[in-house]
Structures are given as C-alpha cells and as structure tokens.
Image: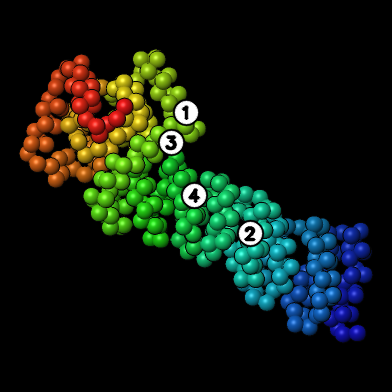
Amino acid sequence: MSAVSQNLAQARSLIELARHHDPEDRAQLFSRVADLFQVSSQSVNPNERALLVEIMRALSEQVDLSLRLTLAERLCDYADADHDLICMLAHDKIEVATPIILRSVVLTEQDLAEIVRMCSVDHWTIVARRPEISEFVSDVLVETQVPGVLRTLAGNLSARISAWGFERLAESARNDKALLTSLVTRHQLPQPIALRMYAWASTALRRHILENFKIDPRLLDQELANSVSVELARDFSDPHTKRLQELVSKLSASGQLKAGFLLKALREDQIDLFRLAFAKLADVEPARMSKILADKNLRVLALAVRAVGIDRSAFPTILQKLHCKDAFDGFGAAEKSAVNEALAISSQDVARVRLEAALRASSDFPG
C-alpha cells in the first residue's frame, strides 16, 4: 500500500471518530485531509481522490467557517487544485466561496453557470465580478434579471458580453440609472444600442454618448424622431411607468402638479416623470408629448412650455437636458425668431390655443 493510500485509509477511519469528538479533532482532521489534496495531487488514483472529496464534504459541515475560508484562500490560486474540491468550496457560504469564484482558474464556464443556477444571489454577484468571464456566463447572469447582479456585470469591464446580453441589459437600464451609467461607459457597447439609450439618458450621459460613440447628429435626430413615440408608448404599460402615471394623477387631482414640479423632475434627471407630468399639464397624450420633446421643431416645444406656465428663462435648461445642446445651437434666424415669439406669449390660455393649432397643422405630431 502506498503512503498516500495509507494516509487515506487512516483518514477514513478517523472520520467516524471525528464525528463524535470535540471541534479541535475535527479541525485537525480537516486540515490533514486538505494537505493531502495538495501534496498528493499527482499520486492518487481516481478512487482515492473521490474518497478525499467524500471525507472533505462530510467534515466541511462540522468545522468552523474560518477553517474552510483558510482552505479556500490557500487553494484559490492553485492551478492544480482538485476540481471537485474547488467546486465544493465555490458552493459553500459566500465568505468561503468568494476567493474561489473570483480567482480559481480550475472553475470552468459550466461550473460558473451551475453556481448561478444553484447558489444564492450573493454568489451570482461574485460570479459577475469575476475577471474575464465569457459571453456564455454573462448570458446566464443576464437571465437572472436581478438588478444588483446586472449592475455588477455591466461594471465589470473585463467581462465579455454578447449582443443578446447587451440588448437585455439595455432594456433593464431604461428604469435603472446606475445600470444605464455603467453600460454607456463600456467601450464594447454596440453603437445602435448606445443610440437607442440616448433617448432616456441623463444630460451627462448623453454628452458621453455623443463624445465616445461618434454618432452622426443627423442619425441621432432621425432615430429620436422615428423611435421615441414607439419606445415611450411601450413604456406606458410597464410597471415603472404605471407607478409614475399614478403619481402624476394624484398630484393633478390634489392641485399640486405645477410648473415647479416639472422643473424639479428635470433637474433631478427624472426624464420619464417630467414627460408624463408635462403631458398631463398640457392636456396632451403622453406619446404625443414624447414626440414634441424629441422633435427638432422647437417652436412647438416653446408653445408647450408657455402653455403649462413654465417661465421662458427655463427654456435653455429644458433644451440642454432633452437635446444636450445650447439654446438655438445650429438654428437659423427665422427659427430663432419663431421660438422667441412663442416664448414671449404671456397668457397660458393663448399659448395653449396656439399649441393646439400647431399640433393640428403638423403631421409630425400625430394624436
């Protein structure tokens, strides 16, 4: 019998004894068997290795967490560590599993996917932090649809994400500012997705998109004009937007929905809330208001601003927030004059009548 086999036989005989002895005996046996994994990795046959794993599984539930953590930290950088033992530690409590999941090269793609399917959300988040995870593993994480996991994945710049993964993350980012921020700062983000996300990004993120994705401004205008109504109409049925609509309705019913509320929402980058509240105050369908806010025809936007009682001095701020440009940037004299004339209207009733006339006269704002 080899020395390793003798040790294994002795360890197996001791395991029953350890079950009934004090914690120190179990701890010593646990450490002894752990040592066998390292010193005998090349000299044990499959049956002996299976026995070692069996012993470790039996003992792991009976020894202090600190011992298992010490073992995990010892093995996490060991490329020749036993695969079954590494998987056992990766499925352990999160404190033990963390160094293994983050650093062990022994874990395969399938192992990581199994951790996501079998373990806790905390384990999923650690998998999302693991350097250089593959598209396959990223897709498994995206399928969880857990916000914290998605944010961690998006913030892991070394993670490889598939086109499908980016699509799903972008949809989740519509109502998750932290996720949106992480996504738009990834250089691997496909340009079409960055273009679509522009519509619901904050001013700072819009500027980042324009500066880093080299999007043709004409393409941006076309995308906003063609898609914003469709996109936001779909938004009106999701739970997040329904909650915002309920809030707007309550504020309106209690007489608290005023121009100041719209500007506060805008300053806080709550663009969806701003759109819905603006539509309510202006008595315009939400999808139609979305079109007004995204359109290049700033005269109609100026009329809407005055129709709900927003002071003309706030117009540059609205333009900056919605279009990420300075007031009248790139506009001709005639266009500037038309906008200034609309902003100069002092009566909300007059502005509302002219807004209604402008909407009826234009095919760009279908009701």
Give the Cα distance between marks 4 and 2.
18 Å
> Which residue corresponds to mark 4?
168
Mark 1 neighbour density, 10 Å: few (under 14) some (14–19) many (20 or more): few
CA gap between label 3 and label 1 equals: 14 Å
Say left or right for 221 vs 94.
Answer: left
Front residue of 292/150: it is 292
Tell me the residue that label 1 is attached to.
243
Say what amino acid the circle numbered 3 marks.
Answer: Arg
Residue neighbourhood size for the residue with mark 3, other residues' Cα within 10 Å, grouped as few (<14), some (14–19), many (≥20): few
Residue 6 in which image quadrant: bottom right
Please state the horizontal and vertical placement of residue 52, each as a whole percent of the image: 82, 71
Secondary structure beneath dot 2 equals helix
**Residue matched to label 3:** 234
Mark earlier in primary sequence (1, 2): 2
Marks 3 & 4, CB-CB < 8 Å contact? no
Q: Which residue is mark 2?
A: 113
Give the residue at the far bottom of this rendering. Answer: 2
Three-letter amino acid code of the residue under disc 1 = Arg
Q: Helix or strand or loop: what does disc 4 sit on?
A: helix
Residue 324's x, y, as percent? 25, 44
Q: Quote the CA–CA distance across marks 1 and 4.
A: 22 Å
Of marks 4 and 2, which one's residue comes earlier in the chain?
2
Please identify, in this view, whether the residue under mark 3 or under mark 1 is nearer the observer.
Answer: 3
